[in-house]
Image (cartoon, rainbow, N blue to C red):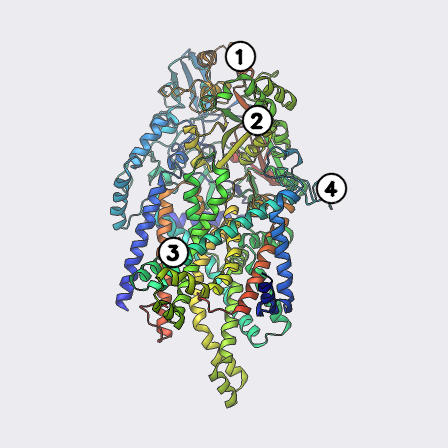
């Protein structure tokens, strides 16, 4: 363990990280965001998803620093009387959950398909990549809207609230797996004919073993870089779906649904319902993107263009 | 060739109107535009508004809820079953054809073929033409609401709609889906002629030159109607001056409109009640009167009106609003959380239970938010509600299937009368008679059924009112439903638009009479 | 080449079949269109009758076969709401969306080309750093938020620009089909905010792409050779370097047009723009199923066509790429 920490400290990755202020700042902010989302139930002054503790009579209270605000609600309340700060923490939690979950799903499907296609080649490759190409040629947002419209209707009402998060994970996961599949396949194609693979084959290792133990680790750099960008994308997709009313249920607002409900009020001077969650969302996605940019510059993998 | 002439004429008219110095155009922004020009193809608020703009009814409601003669100048009761109407003379349709008794009869007979209207005119036997300008309307039983129904008779131009169109389809065909002559052409007697229509985008009305009502103060030459679905955008359009008149106005923007010196807000009490029905067949807990009462006591409907509706609704304790025959002043809204909690305890549900709820999200003012607020309020007495909201196109199916334990429904009485509420919302559901068609709570009480039926044919108004009030009392005591409020109807316009005199509780702004300074 | 196109078309037809099949499978789940067409007084029995007449009660297979038969004749069904053939409705909404995409495309071109080239040539200047920082911010901003902020600033606070609809339009071909907002001042004003929001999605990507391609080219041997030959800098940059960065840009542009089309759904919703995206969401709300299926088919074919054209173009510009084995 000690050894690996030492190794990491001496690595090029850590070296360049130390020298890049933007990356460091982004990393710190990202860690704060992750901690906030993890600890949301502990640090939030209220539980916005508990109907019992929210009171409509507190609706639309401005932030504490404004004349009509109260210190009870630091950033004010939304249109249903939920504490905005708490709702943002919980919303962030959902964003993180969906972002990581969806990317995990995308990566799993994408890596499986990409590895299989790249290593097996031939007909399998042709069929799998054709499917990926076809889906890829449709914009993911449209695919996501389509899938979510179907899923929304397939489940009863009782279970709707519990199911909404896993559902969104599946929707966004299914909508974007081809990104991974194509990149992985491209790297596998490059690795496949290298000597170490040849060697593994000669000593009689089975195909799955070669694929997962030997080829896969060598494609992980690209997976890492794509993943950061994909987490940012998934977070934005969830926000977009919730904004269109196809995402989280009204009783469990995410950042996107908060922005949507604030949009109805934006002309009437109730700006905080939109602006605070908006800034929160942008900042979160921004630091992920900045880290992603930095990773790409440092690791410089051959990425699949287009 | 004919087309060119029409286009040329229209163009000329548009130009003429555009260049004459005192031509007045009113730009109207509504949440939706009429779905068709055929006023009998669908019975809905939007279509009735259109009916008032390019057609005229026999009689119409005034702001004070009395009857105003329109195409009928006077009427008299001949016997228990017959009412004679004397029709206005010298009235012309947009096509130039003269208006006669024949048109009224033709219109009534066509209404019979419209599935939307035929239920409404079910109490009628038919119309007899006495002479060119006199008709007798006959009912099957003595019918107290005959004049109320006469507000639905908008005579159509029988000559114009007779024959076949170029596809061979009869011109009077009522087609729900697909093209028809009446979908794109209309000829009524009303103040405005529809000159162009692009569905969902824009509709243009021009003042009818030969309009019979020369005493009407209305001075608008052209109306341009643009549907603007999004509430916030509709308000923005008014404030930026893109439109002159909007409806409905979202409650959250009232303050902003009141603050702006260039525009003004007008609201009027409406008759649409918003309620939640509790299904005792799905959920045994709801069979317990105490539980139902506890739920009614738990819902702070005054708070909803204050916070969500911004005061633009009247808090309700019963079905019909003040002014309706069945209204009983003693039936007050009853929010009392303490009482609700103790009732739950008495019923043995101190720890509450879990249940489901559905509500539409684009049907009533703030419907989704209201449902969410009720979920909050029921949580306070430990009833955990799982809520799902959906667009109205999906909602009614789920509503009919009674998929949830608590379901939202709003109701506006077609006849502006209390009996209609009970007939559709409170009578025991019966597939054959159609009674209780929207009673998804499955509430069933024989006395309510009997009283509702008896009130329908009772012509002694005092006796009838007593019956209707008794129904309200029973429903109140039984906590048959959770009453929320009666929606107000709201309009806003620039200062030079005279909105106040032309609006009414039915939400049919009589734009024919609107004055723009 | 011919074989390639045939294969693409077969593939496209296959995709359309799957889309329509899925569309049909969910048909009964997404609500009853008849409900939206009738008043509240209409009895269930009468509604059932309408459904019967529309053939909505037939078994799934029968409905689907009927749909395929009609589709083969170019009839994709009637839109319940518009009471017109669904294809006609979509075509009538297409110009509005095209103008939006066109306007956004113009903005992207006009902004990304100079900025991309500049940031490549002067990577250390303040403007370059600012541009790059701003583009990362742009990538991180959801389009609906951009749109809302634009509306708030320019529409609500400053009152400079209108925030909804298309404004005054001009009939381009005299048949009422293409109502264009490009030829009136009012129409142009209405175009600005929606186009800027739509452009903001892919603009950062293009600036970065042009920049990195340009930098790559500037490093190459032939540019070094050109310098050695003593050609004037402008000529090297514009003729030799810039021309060679365009190839990948064109390809990516093709792919991005598809993405822009998808994002018109969000942009059009916020701005109440009467185009295809807005129509799509309204159709979802109204359960106008024929319109939904037709929309997916039209958009699907559009993407297939765009991708095919881009591939062919790519093959023509760059003969080293063999079209058959696309990448």
Whichever of labels 1 and 2 marks the residue nearer the N terminus, that label is: 1
- Which residue is at 35% across, 65% downward? C309
- Which residue is at 27% across, 58% downward? C10
Query: Could you tell me which chain the residue with mark 1 belongs to?
Result: B
Q: Contact, CB < 8 Å: mark 4 with mark 1?
A: no
Instruction: Give the class, few, some or many, for how many residues have Cα within 10 Å of label 3's Cα (few <14, many ≥20).
Output: some
Q: Kindly report the distance in space between the C-alpha atoms of the residues bearing marks 4 and 1.
A: 50 Å
Judging by the rendered image, the residue that carries numbered circle 3 is: A135
Judging by the rendered image, the residue that carries numbered circle 4 is: A71
Look at the numbered disc 1 and give the secondary structure of its residue. helix
Residue under disc 2 on the same chain as residue under disc 3: no
| C314 over A282 or under it: above or below | below
Q: Kindly report the distance in space between the C-alpha atoms of the residues bearing marks 1 and 2.
A: 20 Å
Q: Kindly report the distance in space between the C-alpha atoms of the residues bearing marks 2 and 3.
A: 48 Å
Judging by the rendered image, the residue that carries numbered circle 2 is: B484
Judging by the rendered image, the residue that carries numbered circle 1 is: B470
């Amino acid at each position: 363990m000690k050894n690996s920490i030492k190794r990491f400290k001496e690595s090029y990755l850590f070296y360049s990280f130390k020298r890049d202020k933007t990356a460091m700042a982004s990393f710190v902010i990202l860690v704060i965001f992750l901690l906030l989302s993890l600890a949301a139930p502990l640090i939030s002054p209220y539980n916005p998803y508990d109907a019992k503790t929210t009171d409509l009579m507190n609706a639309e209270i401005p932030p504490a620093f404004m004349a009509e605000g109260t210190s009870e609600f630091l950033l004010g309340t939304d249109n249903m009387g939920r504490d905005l700060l708490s709702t943002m923490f919980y919303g962030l939690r959902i964003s993180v959950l969906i972002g990581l979950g969806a990317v995990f799903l995308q990566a799993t499907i994408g890596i499986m398909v990409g590895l299989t296609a790249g290593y097996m080649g031939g007909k399998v490759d042709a069929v799998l990549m054709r499917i990926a190409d076809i889906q890829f040629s449709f914009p993911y947002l449209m695919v996501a809207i389509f899938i979510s419209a179907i899923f929304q209707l397939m489940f009863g009402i009782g279970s709707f609230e519990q199911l909404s998060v896993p559902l969104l994970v599946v929707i966004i996961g299914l909508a974007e797996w081809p990104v991974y599949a194509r990149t992985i396949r491209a790297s596998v194609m490059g690795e496949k004919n290298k000597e170490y693979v040849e060697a593994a084959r000669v000593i009689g290792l089975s195909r799955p073993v070669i694929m997962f133990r030997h080829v896969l680790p060598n494609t992980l750099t690209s997976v890492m870089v794509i993943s950061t960008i994909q987490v940012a994308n998934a977070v934005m997709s969830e926000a977009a779906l919730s904004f269109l009313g196809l995402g989280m249920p009204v009783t469990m607002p995410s950042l996107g649904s908060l922005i949507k409900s604030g949009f109805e009020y934006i002309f009437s001077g109730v700006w905080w319902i939109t602006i605070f969650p908006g800034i929160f969302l942008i900042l979160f996605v921004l630091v992920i993107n900045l880290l992603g940019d930095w990773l790409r510059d440092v690791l410089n993998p051959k990425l699949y263009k287009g | 060739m004919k087309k060119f002439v029409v286009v040329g004429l229209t163009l000329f008219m548009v130009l003429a109107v555009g260049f004459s110095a005192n031509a007045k155009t009113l730009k109207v922004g509504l949440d939706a535009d009429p779905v068709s020009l055929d006023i009998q193809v669908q019975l809905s608020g939007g279509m009735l508004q259109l009916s008032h703009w390019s057609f005229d009814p026999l009689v119409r409601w005034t702001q004070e809820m009395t009857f105003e003669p329109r195409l009928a100048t006077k009427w008299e009761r001949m016997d228990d079953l017959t009412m004679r109407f004397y029709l206005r003379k010298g009235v012309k349709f947009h096509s130039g054809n003269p208006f006669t008794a024949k048109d009224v009869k033709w219109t009534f007979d066509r209404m019979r073929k419209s599935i939307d209207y035929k239920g409404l005119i079910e109490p009628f036997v038919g119309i007899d033409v006495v002479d060119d300008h006199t008709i007798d309307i006959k009912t099957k039983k003595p019918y107290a609401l005959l004049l109320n129904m006469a507000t639905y008779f908008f005579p159509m131009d029988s000559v114009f709609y007779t024959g076949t169109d170029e596809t061979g389809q009869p011109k009077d065909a009522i087609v729900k889906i697909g093209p028809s002559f009446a979908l794109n052409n209309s000829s009524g007697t009303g103040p405005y002629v529809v000159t162009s229509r692009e569905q969902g985008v824009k509709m243009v009305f021009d003042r009818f030159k030969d309009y019979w009502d020369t005493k009407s103060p209305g001075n608008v030459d052209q109306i341009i109607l643009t549907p603007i679905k999004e509430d916030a955008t509709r308000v923005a359009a008014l404030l930026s001056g893109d439109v002159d008149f909007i409806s409905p106005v979202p409650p959250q923007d009232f303050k902003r409109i009141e603050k702006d010196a260039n525009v003004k807000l007008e609201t009027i009490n409406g008759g649409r009640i918003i309620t939640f029905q509790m299904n005792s067949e799905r959920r045994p807990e709801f069979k317990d009167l105490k539980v139902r009462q506890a739920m009614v006591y738990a819902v702070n409907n005054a708070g909803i009106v204050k916070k969500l509706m911004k005061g633009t609704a009247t808090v309700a304790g019963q079905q019909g609003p003040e002014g309706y025959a069945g209204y009983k002043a003693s039936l007050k809204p009853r929010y009392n959380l303490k009482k609700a909690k103790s009732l739950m305890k008495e019923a043995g549900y101190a720890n509450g239970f879990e249940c489901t709820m559905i509500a539409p999200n684009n049907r009533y003012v703030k419907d989704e938010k209201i449902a969410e607020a009720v979920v909050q309020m029921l949580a306070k007495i430990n009833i955990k509600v799982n809520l799902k909201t959906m667009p109205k196109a999906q909602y009614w199916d789920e509503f009919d299937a009674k998929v949830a334990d608590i379901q939202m429904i709003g109701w506006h009485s077609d006849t502006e009368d209390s009996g209609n509420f009970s007939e559709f919302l409170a009578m025991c559901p019966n597939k054959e008679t159609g009674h209780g068609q929207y009673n998804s709570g499955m509430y069933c009480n024989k006395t309510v059924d009997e009283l509702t039926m008896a009130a329908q044919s009772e012509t002694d108004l005092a006796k009838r009112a007593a019956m209707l009030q008794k129904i309200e009392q029973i429903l109140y005591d039984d906590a048959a439903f959770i009453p929320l409020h009666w929606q107000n109807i709201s309009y806003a316009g620039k200062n030079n638009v005279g909105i106040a005199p032309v609006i009414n509780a039915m939400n049919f702004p009589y734009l024919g009479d609107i004055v723009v300074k | 080449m011919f074989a390639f196109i045939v294969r693409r078309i077969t593939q496209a037809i296959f995709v359309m079949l799957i889309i329509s099949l899925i569309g049909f499978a969910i048909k009964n789940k997404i609500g009853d269109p008849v409900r939206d067409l009738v008043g509240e007084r209409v009895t269930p029995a009468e509604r059932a009758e309408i459904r019967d007449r529309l053939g909505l009660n037939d078994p799934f297979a029968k409905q689907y076969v009927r749909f395929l038969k009609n589709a083969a004749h170019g009839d994709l069904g009637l839109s319940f709401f518009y009471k017109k053939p669904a294809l006609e409705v979509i075509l009538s909404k297409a110009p509005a969306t095209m103008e939006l995409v066109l306007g956004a495309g113009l903005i992207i071109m006009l902004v990304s080309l100079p900025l991309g080239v500049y940031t490549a040539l002067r990577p250390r200047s303040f403007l370059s750093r600012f541009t790059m920082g701003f583009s990362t911010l742009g990538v991180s901003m959801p389009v609906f938020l951009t749109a809302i902020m634009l509306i708030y600033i320019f529409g609500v606070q400053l009152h400079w620009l209108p925030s909804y609809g298309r404004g005054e339009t001009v009939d381009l071909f005299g048949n009422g089909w293409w109502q264009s907002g490009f030829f009136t001042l009012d129409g142009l004003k209405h175009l600005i905010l929606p186009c800027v929001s739509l452009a903001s999605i892919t603009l950062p990507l293009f600036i970065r792409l042009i920049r990195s391609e340009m930098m790559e080219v500037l490093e190459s041997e032939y540019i070094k050779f050109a310098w050695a030959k003593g050609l004037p800098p402008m000529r090297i940059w514009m003729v030799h370097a810039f021309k060679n960065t365009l190839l990948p840009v064109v390809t990516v542009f093709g792919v991005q047009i598809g993405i822009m089309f998808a994002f018109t759904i969000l942009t059009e919703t916020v701005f109440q723009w009467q185009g295809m995206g807005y129509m799509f969401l309204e159709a979802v709300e109204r359960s106008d199923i024929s319109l939904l299926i037709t929309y997916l088919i039209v958009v699907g074919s559009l993407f297939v066509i765009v991708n095919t054209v881009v591939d062919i173009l790519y093959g023509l510009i760059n003969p080293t790429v063999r079209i058959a084995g696309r990448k």
